[in-house]
């Protein structure tokens, strides 16, 4: 894998990542004074890694750790717009879950974020490492390799096949809804999911977490952070291990507890932040390994026994459902500030490298498949943004106090390169010889320049506009088959794409604000990442989306609420077609998604808080020109529920040093289909979760929880294989208890 510096686009080997990081550091440190007056306003190394952030109805980060009153909600700031700004002035839809909200929801990974982020539908197909994210009718269900929701961790884009990952050590998660092509480029049609981990500061922090759950599950986690050299160097380290066995069995293969997952995560971070200087730099490294059964399906019409579809004729060495994914990630980031907090600028440079390996083998009917896979990705970004509104700059910056500039802006350059190597081998249990194998390699590269500017036209009226130019290039090469049926191919395509955004907001009163926006998003053109026949050299065209949105927000000390109406038109939708094992990614037609959504957070009393969010959506194909489904025009887009609702009631009771926090949560998922022809349907269902946290001392917390309280059996994926409808099941009822010590 090759990495290039943001300003040096040369090829190389492993060294360019270091060149990229060093170049970024030199750029940011150039001209930095040895100390001085201008720097003191910017850098606050005393940020605690365990900062108490709260979440509003749109999920956004609360700028203050605690409300001024026990019965008041905190102010909310979002950061995923690439410049921190109060939610009250954000002309779009955002949802954020704080660390406490993630803990209350039991969201240990991104696949569980539908419990904490209203409007998000999650599932998985084939394996828990191939997630399905659906936002506003935009779904990744049919393309696991290029999801419609881009995932970032600490501002670093993740490989598409790393969209499902652990949230251990996360301080908050932000979700921007709708196309985000201007700021984030390719594959952000449904939105952007940004995970922020804790930042080490002056305050030492140490935590230990241990827990047990159903079917022999467990969790163990340790984290430490603090100053290594006060006023100069800070560090953090975190390790986590989780196991959540499934509840699907196979009598034919003599296996049980299929369908679960295990993961381990280690993360280390260094932060250089000299006190009184207008710059800082960070570097971090992480390794995450996840394993779980691959392709554990049950008969679609008979799901209650939770018995996997398998053939007893599969030879003993090949009877195991297995998949393992390990990823190594490194990143470096630096930033330098100029001017005053309300009127200055910030230059940020980021370089990252990510390597990933899949091992998988699984029986499906009389077949066994082995599909090893390797991925490499390098990214570089340089960004210049205005200062003002940062959550940790204090109230003055957050409200824009002392600001004379009537506008804010962010400008950036971005580069991303991803490479993939894949092999596929099918073996039939009843035939000694193996079926033809395929081998492939794919290379994708994206270069982009973008800018986004907002103007305060009057004290109540503001407007914004953004523009991005991307250059995307894809290459493929593959070979497969045997004898007369052998095939091979290679191809290349490149394309320029313009993306734009227009928005306006009106402050009706101190409590009420309305906004409108028009935004674009796209998936780039490319080639099938799992080649199966010579037609794969034909590739597919880019997919484009255009979104129209209007919304209002209410912000009072006790109630924070939002309402939005939207319509998204998508052209040349990219979907996998044909049978499993012979799937080809193709443009199948056009689609339209229309809906309304609402969220609210209500401080009922000093002891009780109610959160609720829901949507009604209709996503249909307006045209369908792919072969194999002549009547698909007008059908519902798969994996797009007609409606959804999240409601959470949380209490807080204190007696002396003891704190008791009960919680009950209900989640409704409307009816939806799993296939383009709308023949495989999952009806609407409601899931209930309950939890009780007891804090006998400030540093100790005991939590007991039950998920899927009623034990409802539901499908989260379905397809037809050899004429037989099959389904993958969501997790059944589970219960557990955990103990956490925090210092």
Image (spheres, rainbow, N blue to C red):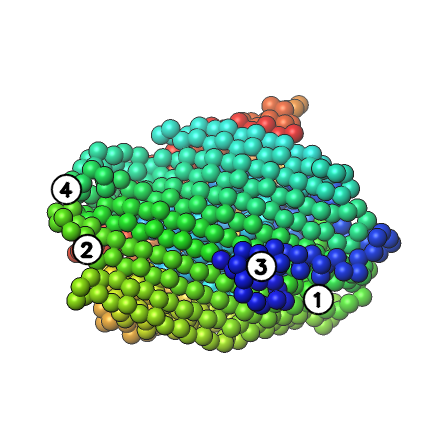
Label 2 vs 3, first from the N-terminus: 3
| Front position among marks 4 and 2 | 2
Looking at the picture, tell me which residue is in the foreground, 677 or 667: 677
Instruction: Tell me the tag on residue 313.
Output: 4
The CA distance from mark 4 to mark 2 is: 17 Å
| Residue 225 percent coordinates (x, y) | 65, 37
The CA distance from mark 2 to mark 3 is: 41 Å
Q: As drawn, which residue projects farthest toward the left?
A: 430
Label 1: element kind: strand
Residue carrying label 2: 435
Instruction: Tell me the tag on residue 408.
Output: 1
Side of 559 relative to 216 (left or right): right
Kindly identify the residue that appears in the image at 28 percent across and 53 percent down.
718
Kindly identify the residue that appears in the image at 50 percent across and 53 percent down.
354
Query: Which image quadrant for residue 507?
Result: bottom right
Instruction: Tell me the tag on residue 203.
Output: none
Label 2: element kind: loop
Residue carrying label 3: 16
Q: Is residue 341 above or below residue 472?
A: above
Looking at the picture, tell me which residue is in the foreground, 269 or 518: 269
Kindly identify the residue that appears in the image at 43 percent across and 64 percent down.
443
The CA distance from mark 3 to mark 4 is: 51 Å
Label 1 vs 3, first from the N-terminus: 3
């Amino acid at each position: 894998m090759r990495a290039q510096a943001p300003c040096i686009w040369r090829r190389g080997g492993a060294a360019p990542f270091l060149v990229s990081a060093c170049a970024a550091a030199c750029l940011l440190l150039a001209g930095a004074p040895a100390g001085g007056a201008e720097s003191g306003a910017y850098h606050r190394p005393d940020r605690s890694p365990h900062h108490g952030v709260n979440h509003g109805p749109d999920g956004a980060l609360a700028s203050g750790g605690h409300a001024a009153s026990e019965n008041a909600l905190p102010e909310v700031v979002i950061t995923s717009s690439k410049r921190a700004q109060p939610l009250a002035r954000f002309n779009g839809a955002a949802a954020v879950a704080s660390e406490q909200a993630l803990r209350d929801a039991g969201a240990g990974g991104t696949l569980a974020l539908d419990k904490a982020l209203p409007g998000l539908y999650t599932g998985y197909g084939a394996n828990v490492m191939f997630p399905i994210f659906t936002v506003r009718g935009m779904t990744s269900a049919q393309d696991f390799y290029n999801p419609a929701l881009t995932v970032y961790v600490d501002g670093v884009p993740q490989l598409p096949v790393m969209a499902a990952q652990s949230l251990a050590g996360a301080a908050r998660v932000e979700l921007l809804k709708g196309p985000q092509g201007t700021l984030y480029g390719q594959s952000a049609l449904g939105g952007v999911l940004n995970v922020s981990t804790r930042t080490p500061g002056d305050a030492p922090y140490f935590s230990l977490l241990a827990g047990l759950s159903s079917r022999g599950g467990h969790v163990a986690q340790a984290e430490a952070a603090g100053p290594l050299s006060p006023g100069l160097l800070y560090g953090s380290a975190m390790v986590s291990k989780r196991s959540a066995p499934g509840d699907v069995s196979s009598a034919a293969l003599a296996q049980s507890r299929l369908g679960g997952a295990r993961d381990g995560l280690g993360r280390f971070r260094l932060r250089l932040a000299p006190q009184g200087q207008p710059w800082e730099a960070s570097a971090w490294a992480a390794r995450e390994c996840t394993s779980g059964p691959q392709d554990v399906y049950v008969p679609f019409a008979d799901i209650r026994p939770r018995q996997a579809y398998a053939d007893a004729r599969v030879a003993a060495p090949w009877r195991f459902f297995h998949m393992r994914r390990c990823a190594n990630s490194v990143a470096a980031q630096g930033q330098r500030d100029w001017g005053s907090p309300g009127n200055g600028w910030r230059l940020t440079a980021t370089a990252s490298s990510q390597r990933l390996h899949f091992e998988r083998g699984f029986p499906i009917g009389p077949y066994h498949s082995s599909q090893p896979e390797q991925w490499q990705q390098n990214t570089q970004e340089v960004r210049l943004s205005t200062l003002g509104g940062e959550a940790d700059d204090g109230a003055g910056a957050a409200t824009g106090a002392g600001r004379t500039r009537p506008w804010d802006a962010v400008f950036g350059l971005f580069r991303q390169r991803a490479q993939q190597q894949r092999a596929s081998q099918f073996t039939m249990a009843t035939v000694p010889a193996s079926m033809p194998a395929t081998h492939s390699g794919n290379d994708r590269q994206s270069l982009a320049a973008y800018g986004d500017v907002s103007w305060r036209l009057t004290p109540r009226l503001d407007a914004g506009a953004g523009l991005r130019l991307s250059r995307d290039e894809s290459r493929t090469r593959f070979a497969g088959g045997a004898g007369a049926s052998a095939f091979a191919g290679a191809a290349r395509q490149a394309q320029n794409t313009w993306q734009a955004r227009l928005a306006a907001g009106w402050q009706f009163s101190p409590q009420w604000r309305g906004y409108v926006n028009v935004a674009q998003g796209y998936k780039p053109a490319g080639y099938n990442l799992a080649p199966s026949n010579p037609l794969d050299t034909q590739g597919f065209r880019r997919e484009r989306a255009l979104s129209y949105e209007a919304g209002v927000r209410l912000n009072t000390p006790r109630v924070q609420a939002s309402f939005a109406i939207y319509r998204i038109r998508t052209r040349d939708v990219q979907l996998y077609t044909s049978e499993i094992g012979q799937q080809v990614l193709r443009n199948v037609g056009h689609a339209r998604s229309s809906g309304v959504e609402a969220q609210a957070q209500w401080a009922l009393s000093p002891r009780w808080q109610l959160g609720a969010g829901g949507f009604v959506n209709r996503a249909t194909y307006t045209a369908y020109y792919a072969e194999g489904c002549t009547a698909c025009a007008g059908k519902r887009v798969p994996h797009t529920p007609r409606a959804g609702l999240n409601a959470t009631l949380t209490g807080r009771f204190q007696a002396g040093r003891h704190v008791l926090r009960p919680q009950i949560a209900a989640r409704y998922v409307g009816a939806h289909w799993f296939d383009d022809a709308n023949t495989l349907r999952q009806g609407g269902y409601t899931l209930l979760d309950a939890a009780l946290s007891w804090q006998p001392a400030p540093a100790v917390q005991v939590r007991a929880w039950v998920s899927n309280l009623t034990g409802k059996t539901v499908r989260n994926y379905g397809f037809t294989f050899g004429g037989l409808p099959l389904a993958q099941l969501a997790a059944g009822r589970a219960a557990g208890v955990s103990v956490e010590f925090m210092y």
